[in-house]
Amino acid sequence: MAGETPSFATRLGWRLEALAFDVFSGLLRLFPVDTVSAMGGWLLRTLGPLTGEHRIADLNLRLAFPELDDAERRRILRGQWDNLGRTAFEFAIMDRITPESGRVEAFGGDRVLELARQGRPIVMFSGHFANWEAMAAAAAQAGLKLRISYRRANNPHMDRRIVEGRLQSGIHLFAPKGKEGNRELIAALKRGEILGFLNDQRDNAGVEAPFFGHMVRTAPGPVRLALSNDAVLVPVAVKRLEGARFVARAYEPFELEKTGDRARDIQAGVARVNAFMEARIREAPEQWLWAHRRWPVEVYRKGKKSPHP
């Protein structure tokens, strides 16, 4: 029940989880950046294919790229686990993976700064590409006042570590809930802050739009905020070059059309968001997070020829 006090066992588990995270992160920080990244890649390349998520990722690839042969699909799956493992381990050393360290090349920040100087409200969106944390580092280095919407961790001790870690990079995290949360997001836009969203996951209450030839539901929040506040929508993506080195890029802004039909305008905006995500995924499919159920159940039922790699 909402508001129910967690049991002693739950609170103890939370503290033990946070302690384990602190110890493990401390150990990782003893090693060079490329070693940490490589260890994470090796671990998930080894363990990932043994999980149920591997079957989900394989089925997702069959839905998105039905033309791929088995060998190419296995290559992408192996690359996906390598990238995800690297990203997980790199979390402990993100203060060393920055533009200042030479590990993140940033492009397009001047375009966003110019929009900010013009007084335009800005909503940025991206997806789970490569190490998506590198995008925040690039934004902070460019001097952007960024507030990222995120889902609060169930463990409050872990949530505090996540928030504090981002603050070190100059990034404010915000977990909006209900009307009060929406008001805070609007207030942030009016203060000149840039809102950021990862907008590539399934949202059962979202708006339907095409994605790799299938209709999926996508959260309309960024599009709605942009339309309601005359904001420009800026797509952003990051790509892993080699090891723990990245390119983060802000693309040409979207000026959303207002026809007077709000529902249609939102649907059109969400369709553009999905089209951007699909284009970036096609460029480097092994660097996207395939191990989640992005498509509706009925699409999986139709396309489920063989769930096993």
Image (tube, rainbow, N blue to C red):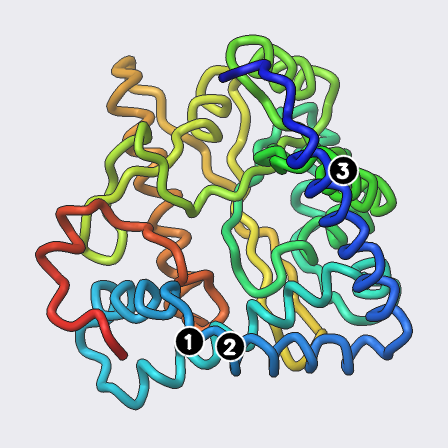
Sort mark 2 into few (<14), some (14-19) or many (20+) by Cα contacts within 10 Å: few
Question: Does dot 2 land on a helix, a strand or a loop?
Answer: helix
Instruction: Give the spatial CA distance, label 3 vs label 1.
Output: 30 Å
Where 9 sits versus 1, above or below? below
Question: Does dot 3 land on a helix, a strand or a loop?
Answer: helix
Residue position for label 2: 47
Identity, as a three-letter code, of the amino acid under mark 1:
Leu
Residue position for label 1: 50
Identity, as a three-letter code, of the amino acid under mark 2:
Leu
Residue 240 lies, in percent from the top left, at: 61, 72
Which sits in the foreground, 62 or 186? 62
Sort mark 1 into few (<14), some (14-19) or many (20+) by Cα contacts within 10 Å: few
Residue 29 lies, in percent from the top left, at: 87, 68
Residue position for label 3: 157
Q: How many marks?
A: 3
Identity, as a three-letter code, of the amino acid under mark 3:
His
Residue 90 lies, in percent from the top left, at: 72, 66
Where 211 sits versus 271, above or below? below
Where 33 sits versus 93, above or below? below
Which sits in the foreground, 5 or 220? 5
Instruction: Give the spatial CA distance, label 2 vs label 1.
Output: 6 Å
Q: Residue at x 69, y 43 (%)?
A: 13
Q: Are marks 2 and 1 in contact (CB under 8 Å)?
A: yes
Where 56 sits versus 198, above or below? below
Residue 127 lies, in percent from the top left, at: 50, 51
Q: Tell me: 205 left or right of 121.
A: left
